[in-house]
Image (cartoon, grey):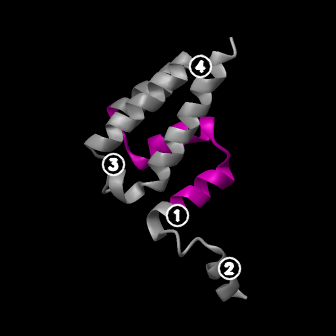
Amino acid sequence: MKALTGYRKYAENLMRKLLRGYRIYFSRDVLNSDGRRLLEDIIKSMIYSKEYHPGLIRSVRRNPSMENVLKLARILLAEEEIEDLLKTGIEGPIHNSAWHYLEQE
């Protein structure tokens, strides 16, 4: 049964890729076709890892908005990590680096 944990890690990594690539995979806060492909891989991995949430998965497939994707992301990732990944995806890596924190002081 240890192979199932690999599916969970794979789903987590794909979700990180999806959130970090906000400008690539989203348009007007809805997943585009590339983002939908990535979302389907995430869902398959969640099903293989026995983390099946049928109601949530159904709603994300029907309406792949940012709000619904974040609901799915909260199952896989911590809230702080989600915020950090989104900030990096939207503002870019420079705005979310140590230089940004030094400028605030």
In terms of secondary structure, what is the magenta stretch mainly?
Answer: helix
Q: Judge from the rendering whether residue 41 lies leftward or rightward of residue 51; answer left or right.
A: left
- Say which residue appears at 52% left-offset and 18% top-offset: 47
Mark 3 burial class by Cα count in 10 Å: few <14, some 14-19, many 20+: some
**Residue type marked 3:** Val
Residue 101 - label? 2
- Say which residue appears at 54% left-offset and 24% top-offset: 46
The residue pinned by badge 1 equals 88
**Residue type marked 1:** Thr
Pointer 2 or 4: first along the chain: 4
Q: Is residue 65 magenta?
A: yes
Residue 49 - label? 4
Q: Which residues are magenta?
A: 62-87
Residue 10 image point, x, y percent: 55, 32
Q: Residue furthest left?
A: 33
Pointer 1 or 3: first along the chain: 3
Residue 51 image point, x, y percent: 59, 21
Give the number of callouts. 4
Pointer 2 or 1: first along the chain: 1
